[in-house]
Amino acid sequence: MEPSWHNAPVPSFGSKDARLLIVGLAPGLRGANRTGRPFTGDWAGDLLYETLIEYGFATGLYEERPDDSLTLVDTRITNAVRCVPPQNKPTPAEIKTCRSFLEATISDMPNLKAIVALGRIAHESLARALGQSPSKLPFSHGASFDLPQIGSGIRVFDSYHCSRYNTNTGVLTPKMFKAVFKDVQRMLG
Ligand code: URA
């Protein structure tokens, strides 16, 4: 037991008025599950927040705690799964159950223009949340898809998840990750 930890569903971080939504996978046990803020205290947060600051989607200092000075700019971060999953691997049932929260998060964002899906699982849950079949909208790192039928038009950008595993094995390099946010920046202007 860790009574000082958050240990509960992790709420989205950032304003509902943002034009950009980033969809992660699930809170890390000792990261977001501990601190209560997505990607905060997680390995994955180091690259994510560094990149967001570099491309103007965040300001301040990321210090791995929810009361640091980091502020998101026109950006909101959520997770496909809201609670820390057993063995850090979300089950299909959890992903399905949490999809209603993802749907609500999306429909609560009136200015939404761009969504970054971090990894295949987030991409597939997001596709379903947007009423698309993942088989018709397959995950592809670096690709983007226009969904003109959603709201006033949304573009989905795919990236490999910025996890410790993916970055340590070279599946995702910082350069590859940053290129995705460069594309988003170019689109949002
Ligand atoms: N922390 C999160 O909040 N989400 C992830 O996908 C990974 C780490």
Image: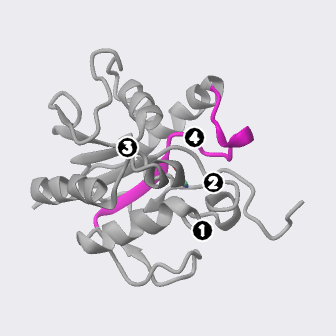
Residue at x 42%, y 40% (from the top left corner): 119
Question: Can the viewer see residue 39?
Answer: no
Q: Does the magenta-highlighted stretch encompass residue 120?
A: no
Residue at x 20%, y 40% (from the top left corner): 155
Mark 1: amino acid: Gly
Question: Are there few (<14), some (14-19), or many (20+) residues within 10 Å of tag 3?
Answer: many
Mark 3: amino acid: Tyr
Task: Point out residue 63 in the picture as x, y percentages from the top left corner.
Answer: 53, 81
Task: Point out residue 94 in the picture as x, y percentages from the top left corner.
Answer: 64, 30
Question: Can the viewer see residue 160?
Answer: yes
Q: Mark 2 highlights which residue? A: 28
* SS of the residue under disc 3: loop
Task: Point out residue 64 in the picture as x, y percentages from the top left corner.
Answer: 56, 75
Q: Mark 4 highlights which residue? A: 81
Residue at x 72%, y 40% (from the top left corner): 87
**Range shown magenta:** 74-91
Answer yes or no: do the residues labelled 1 and 2 have beta carbons within 8 Å? yes
* SS of the residue under disc 4: loop
Q: Measure the C-alpha gap from mark 1 to mark 3.
A: 20 Å
N-terminal-most mark, 1 or 2: 2
Mark 2: amino acid: Gly
In the image, is the residue at mark 2 within 8 Å of ligand 1 by its beta carbon? yes
Mark 4: amino acid: Val
Answer yes or no: do the residues labelled 4 and 1 have beta carbons within 8 Å? no
Q: Mark 3 highlights which residue? A: 160
**Residue 41 got which mark?**
1
